[in-house]
Amino acid sequence: MITLNETVLQLLLAAVVVLPLLGAVAALLPAPPGLRGSSPEQAVLRHGVTVTGAVLAATLVLAAGFDYDRAERIQAGTDLSWIPALGIRLHLGVDGISLPLLVLTALLTFLCALHSYRNPPKGPSPAAFVALLLVLEAGTLATFAVLDLVLFFLAFEMVLIPMYFLIARWGGEGRARAAWKFILYTLLGSVVMLLGLLLVGLEAGTFDMVALAADNGASLSRSTQIIAVLALAAGFAVKTPMWPLHTWLPDAHTAAPTVGSVLLAGVLLKMGTYGLVRIVLPAAPEGAQFFAPYLAAFACVGIVYGSLVCLALVRKGAGGDLKRLVAYSSVGHMGFVLLGIATLTRTGVNGALFANVAHGLITGLLFFLVGAVKERTGSTDLDQLAARTSGAGLYGRSPRLGGLLAFGAVASLGLPGLAGFWGEMLALLGAYHPADGLSRPAYLVFMAVGGLGTLLTAAYLLLVVRRVCMGERQPTTAALPDVRRYEFAAWTPLVVLTVLAGLWPALLLGVTDPAVQHLLPGVSR
C-alpha cells in the first residue's frame, strides 16, 4: 500500500471514470500521421489498448492508495452540486464493496482490448467498436463509483446502448434478435427500477446513498420500503439475471462477439447484485427482510434450473452449444450470489461479493476459451466439437488450450483452492444461519437445494471436459493451433487471480467485510 492524500485519490477516481469517455471521442477522430502504424484500423485498436491500459493503471494506483484499515468508509470522495433544484449531486467515492468491482472492470476491459488488437471481431468500423467498448467501460465504472441514486441510474443505463450495438453489429448468427431481446428486457427492468429509486429518494428526502445508508430506513415507512424493494429488486433481477427473468441472457451470450460475452458475464451481470447490496439492503432493511425468502427461493430455482439446462445441453446428440452452456451456467452461479444476499447476514453478503468477483474472473476466462475453440474448429456445437476433437480431444490436438479449458471448468464447479469455491460456500453457510426474523427451516431447505446445485454443476462441467477435452472416437493426427502469445497475455491474469483468490480468500474478504459490517449495522454474523 502506498500513501496518497485524499486530493490525489479524488483525481484518480475522476480519471478512472472520465478517461474512457475521452478515449471514446478520440477513437472516432482521425489518428495523427505519426501514430497510424501500418493502417488506421491498427491505430484505433492500439488506441483502445492504450486507453484501457491507462484506466487499469489508474485503478491499480487508486487501489494501492486505498486505506484498507478504513475499508468501510467512503474514500476518494467528490461531492459537488449538479442539479440543486432536485438535490442531485456529483457524488463519487469507493469503499471495500465497490473497489474490487472497479479493479475487475478495468482489468477485463483492458484484456478485451488487448485480445481485440490481435484478433478484432468481424464487423464494421474498428473505430466504432473501440468507441463503444470505451463507453461501455465508462458506464460500468461509473455505476460502481457514483453515490447518488440518479447518477447511479444514468450510469446503469449508459451501458445498454454500447452493448446493444456490440451484439447487433459485431455478433454472430441471430445477433439482431438477441440484441433486441437484450435491450427490451433491460429497458423494461430499468423503468421499474427508476420508479423504485425515485420513491426512495423522494420519501427519504435525499438521493445520496451514503445518507440513505446512515439513515438505515428510518425515514421510510415499512409499506414504502416494501413497494420500493419490489420495484428495485425487479429491475436488478433482470440485469443479474434471476430466474425467470433470465431468458435474454443465453441468446445475448451466444450471439455476442467474444469480448462482448466476456464483459457481459464478467462485469454487466454484477451491476444488479451490486445495486441490491449498495442500495436495497441499507436503505430499506424492512423491505429487504420481507422479500428475502422469495429472493432466496428464486435463487435456488435458478441454481438448479441452470444446472439442469446445462446437463441437457451437454448430453450426446442434444445439439447443445458450448457458448450457450456457459451462459446458462451463469444463471446458476449468479443464483448463489442472490442466495448469499437473501440471507441478510455478513457471511452471506460477503460470499455474494466474493462470488461476484470469482464469477467475473472464471466466466470471463471461459468465454475467451470458447471463442478460441470456435476460431480453431469453426463451431461451438458440442456434438461437432466432440467429433472434431476426437480421440485425444483438445488435450491431444491443442494441449495448452485443452488444459486451460479444463482449468476453467474445474474452477467454475467450485473446486477447493480456486476462487469459485469460497463464494458458494459462504452463501450456503449464510443460509445455514440466516438473519434474525427469517425462517431457519426454510433457509435450511434453500441450503440443501443450493448444495444439490453444486453437485449438478460438477456433473455437467466434468461432462464438458470429457467430451471436448478428451474426445470420444479414434485418435486423429490433425492438430489445432495451440495458445498464441497474445492469448497467453490476455488469459494469464485471469488464471493467476483465480488461483490467488482461491488460496488466499482473505485478500478479498478482508476488503469487503468491514464495508459489509458498516452497511448492515444490526447484523451480528
Image (cartoon, grey):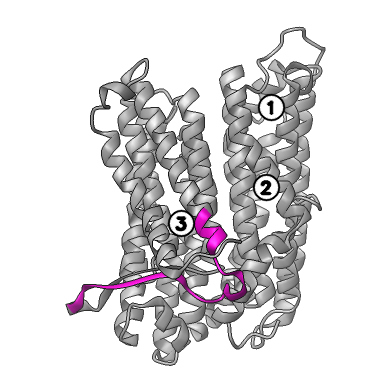
Q: Position of residue 227 (x, y in %)?
A: 40, 80
Q: Which residues are magenta?
A: 61-84
Residue 338 lies in the magenta-colored region = no
User: Which comes before the other along the chain, label 1 or label 2?
Assistant: 1
Tell me the amino acid under the disc marked 2: Leu
- Foreground: disc 1 or disc 2: 2
Task: Give the secondary structure at mark 1.
Answer: loop
Q: Quadrant of the C terminus?
A: bottom right
Which label number is shown at residue 195? none
Q: Residue at x 44, y 76 (%)?
A: 229
Q: Quadrant of the N terminus?
A: bottom right
160 is higher (above) or lower (below) than 78 = above
* Farthest-out residue, left: 85
SS of the residue under disc 2:
helix
Residue 388: name its quadrant. Answer: top right
Q: State the residue at coordinates (32%, 86%).
A: 203
Q: Are marks 3 and 1 in contact (CB under 8 Å)?
A: no
* Residue topped by disc 1: 317
- Give the residue type that dot 3 points to: Lys
Q: Measure how far apart labels 3 and 1 are at the Cα level.
A: 32 Å
Label 1: few (<14), some (14–19) or many (≥20) C-alpha neighbours in 10 Å? few
In this view, the residue in front, 120 or 488, is 488
Horizontal side of residue 145 vs 25, given as left or right: right
Q: Amino acid at mark 1?
A: Gly
Residue 150 quadrant: bottom left
Label 3 SS = helix
> In the image, what residue occupies the spot 71% across and 22% down?
386
Q: Which residue is mark 2?
A: 497
Mark number displayed over residue 239: 3
Q: Identify the residue shown where x is 44% and y is 27%.
A: 173
